[in-house]
Image (spheres, grey):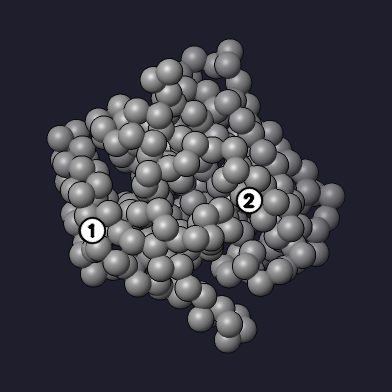
Amino acid sequence: MSTNTDILYISHGGGPLPLLGDPGHREMVEHLTRIAGELRQPSAILVVSAHWEEQVPTVTSGAQPSLIYDYSGFPPESYAIEYPCPGHPELAQQIHAALEQAGISARLDTQRGFDHGLFVPLKLMYPKADIPCVQLSLVSSLDASNHLAMGRALRALNHENLLVIGSGFSFHNMQAFFAPSTAETEARNQAFEEWLEKTCCDPDITEAERNERLLHWEQAPAARFCHPREEHLLPLHVCYGLAGAASETHLSATILGKQSGMFYWRLSDD
């Protein structure tokens, strides 16, 4: 296991809106900026983004990745956002090796840039853009067990003061974001968030049970209402697979009118 590793699953909001002063992201921005001040200063950041899927886990390995503005319909300034952080080819090689050693076929990609699942939250958290970053894809099968296994494989990393961010959204129903809220939709949103908090944070749940709950997340209350497609939830599975323990901290924020969660694990050799 990497020494002094911080693991953070975040709800990253809608496209570039958190950087544009959107009032529906105020709580999210406050949480992320505060969290950055409370974390240990990372020597490198690994982001598992909901916005990148490949047939096998794929790792950015370029020295200076560009940005991918993987959204549309936003103001012109959304496509001029800069976040010139360096890549970290050596860490990318280590991640690739850890996955392969665990029997998970993986791939390096020297050409791919960083999508908004990385540069939007990191521009809020670390605006100097001076921390080397690597991005890891999801697997396009969207199988929960694969992503739990990816996280477990990352335990073999040996990198001091690594920050691992699962960049997703604990509520991600696009139709519901743009429809009027009702008592029923609010209750569904809350039911899933309460289930997720209990699953990730309850110290009385065994790790075997916690793993099973995440493996079969579709059985949770209102699971498919909150996640018609699960790509924004699965970065959490990678985070838990790596941590292998209850989350120490849960934060809740109203984002785009929906209750959304964030989870933090602190692994230390101290």
Closest to the observer, 170 or 191: 170
Identified at 67% across, 38% down, the residue is 251
Between residues 58 and 135, which one lies in front from this camera angle? 135
Q: Position of residue 91 (x, y in %)?
A: 25, 47
Q: Which mark is residue 33?
A: 2
Asked whether residue 209 is in view, the answer is yes
> Where's residue 3, x and y in %?
35, 28
Q: Nearer the viewer, mark 1 or mark 2?
A: 2
Please, which residue is most extreme toward the bottom here? 76
First in sequence: mark 1 vs mark 2: 2
Where 103 sits versus 117, above or below? above
Residue situated in front as seen by the camera: 266 or 38: 38
How many discs mark residues in the rendered view? Answer: 2
The residue drawn where x is 27% and y is 54% is 88
- Report helix, strand or loop for mark 2: helix
SS of the residue at dot 1?
loop
Give the residue type that dot 1 points to. Answer: Ser
Vertical order, 154 against 116 (above or below): above
Tag shown at residue 61: 1
